[in-house]
Image (cartoon, grey):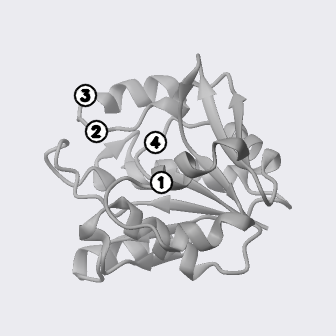
Amino acid sequence: MIQGLLLAAGRSQRFGSDKRRAPLAGEPLLLRSVQRWLEACDDVLAAPLVVLREADEGERELADMLQRIGVPSTFCAEAQFGMAHSLAWGVLQTPRADGWLIGLADMPALQASSIRAVAHALRPRSIVMPTHGGLRGHPVGFGRDFGGELLQLRGDHGARAVLQAHREALHWLELEDPGLLLDVDQPQQLEQAQALRD
């Protein structure tokens, strides 16, 4: 099975408050994003694992919220050092996966069909990059053969080093989904995300 990893350990500095809890159509943004991944699950793509920050009271509250809808989560004590630490931690927790879809938990407008399309295009030695209008988006898929390199990632550049080292493995997947480009970094983008979902 392909494993979805939703990175949700950022500090929301540009947003001004914890955007994971920001209301979107009556529910926290994090839940709205996770719902799309649950809709995408099939016999190829497993339920997502959400990577949270260190296990303090607030993070445990989010984990409980996710558990109530049947979504597992994990706490990354090194999340403060950058996104790549969260990504590597998620891969470490799912060693039997046939590949990984790396998504961002602040993308509630992403269509379930897009998530599923990336999962189905993934092969052991491929990296699948979704695009819309020629622009790169998320989630990005990494085949099982890249697991070792993903585990070594550090810093705040995500999986950029793996992408740069394996351009020959890159498969571009153009999709009719503007939601794969919209991650909510500022409060005013909540309205834009809701418009794309409707």
User: Which residue position is annotated with label 1?
Assistant: 161
Q: Looking at the image, which residue sits at the far top?
A: 133
Q: Secondary structure at mark 1?
A: helix
Instruction: Check disc 1 and give the amino acid type.
Output: Ala
Tell which circle, 3 or 4, labels the residue nearer the N-terminal end. Answer: 4
**Residue 32 appears anywhere in the view:** yes
The location of residue 153, given as percent across then percent down, is: 44, 67
Mark 3 nearby-residue class (10 Å; few <14, some 14–19, many ≥20): few
Marks 2 and 4, Cα distance to the nearest angstrom?
10 Å
Instruction: Check disc 4 and give the amino acid type.
Output: Met
The location of residue 55, given as percent across then percent down, is: 30, 83
Q: Are marks 3 and 1 in contact (CB under 8 Å)?
A: no
Tell which circle, 1 or 2, labels the residue nearer the N-terminal end. Answer: 1
Which numbered disc covers residue 188? 3
Of residues 15 and 77, the one drawn nearer to the viewer in this rendering: 77
Instruction: Check disc 3 and give the amino acid type.
Output: Gln
Q: Secondary structure at mark 3?
A: loop
Query: Residue at image x 57%, y 51%?
Result: 165
Instruction: Check disc 2 and give the amino acid type.
Output: Asp
User: Which residue position is annotated with label 4?
Assistant: 107
Marks 3 and 2, Cα distance to the nearest angstrom?
9 Å
Marks 4 and 1, Cα distance to the nearest angstrom?
23 Å
Marks 3 and 1, Cα distance to the nearest angstrom?
32 Å
Tell which circle, 3 or 1, labels the residue nearer the N-terminal end. Answer: 1
Mark 1 nearby-residue class (10 Å; few <14, some 14–19, many ≥20): few
Along the horizontal axis of the image, is 162 left or right of 172? left
